[in-house]
Image: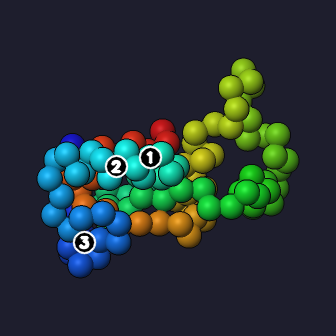
């Protein structure tokens, strides 16, 4: 993964400012267990769904019902809807070191 980082080390809000590879993996695992996913490569942001009623917010914004966000095959809510919510609406964000970020997947 190669990307340009637009942050300073002072901007990091979670984890070590200069983690080793092992610390990066442990920090990434901790964040993923808490529900965080990658939202910005350039700004090293991770975010998670921050409200119980997040589907209601999307439904209101898109003028549809909550049921429209569920997959037809019964596998639950589509990852693209979760990804959109955390990128646009979530206020629960952290800036992490780039080596931590490379171990955290996005919703896609």
**Between marks 1 and 2, how big is the CA–CA gap?**
6 Å
For marks 3 and 1 on the same chain, the one whose residue lies earlier in the sequence: 3
Q: Name the foreground residue: 36 vs 86.
A: 36
Quarter containing the N terminus? top left
**Between marks 3 and 1, how big is the CA–CA gap?**
21 Å
Residue sitting at x 57%, y 42% = 80
How many neighbours does mark 1 have within 10 angstroms: few (below 14), some (14-19), or many (20 or more)?
some
Residue 3 visible to the viewer: no
- Residue linked to disc 3: 7
**Between marks 2 and 3, how big is the CA–CA gap?**
18 Å
Cβ atoms at labels 1 and 2 below 8 Å apart: yes
- Residue linked to disc 2: 28
What secondary structure is found at the residue carrying circle 1?
helix
The location of residue 66, given as percent across then percent down, is: 81, 46
Q: Name the foreground residue: 55 vs 48.
A: 48
How many neighbours does mark 2 have within 10 angstroms: few (below 14), some (14-19), or many (20 or more)?
many
Residue sitting at x 24%, y 51% = 24
In the image: residue 25, left or right of residue 84 = left
Q: Is residue 86 above or below residue 12?
A: above
- Residue linked to disc 1: 32
Question: Which is more foreground, mark 3 or mark 1?
Answer: 1
The location of residue 51, given as percent across then percent down, is: 68, 61
């Amino acid at each position: 993964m190669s990307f340009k980082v637009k942050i300073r080390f002072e901007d990091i809000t979670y984890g070590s400012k200069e983690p080793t590879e092992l610390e990066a993996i442990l920090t990434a695992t901790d964040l993923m267990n808490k529900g965080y996913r990658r939202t910005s490569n350039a700004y090293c942001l991770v975010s998670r769904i921050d409200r119980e009623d997040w589907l209601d917010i999307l439904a209101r914004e898109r003028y549809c019902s909550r049921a429209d966000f569920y997959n037809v095959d019964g596998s639950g809510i589509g990852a693209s809807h979760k990804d959109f919510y955390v990128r646009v609406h979530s206020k629960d964000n952290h800036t992490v070191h780039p080596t931590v970020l490379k171990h955290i997947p996005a919703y896609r």
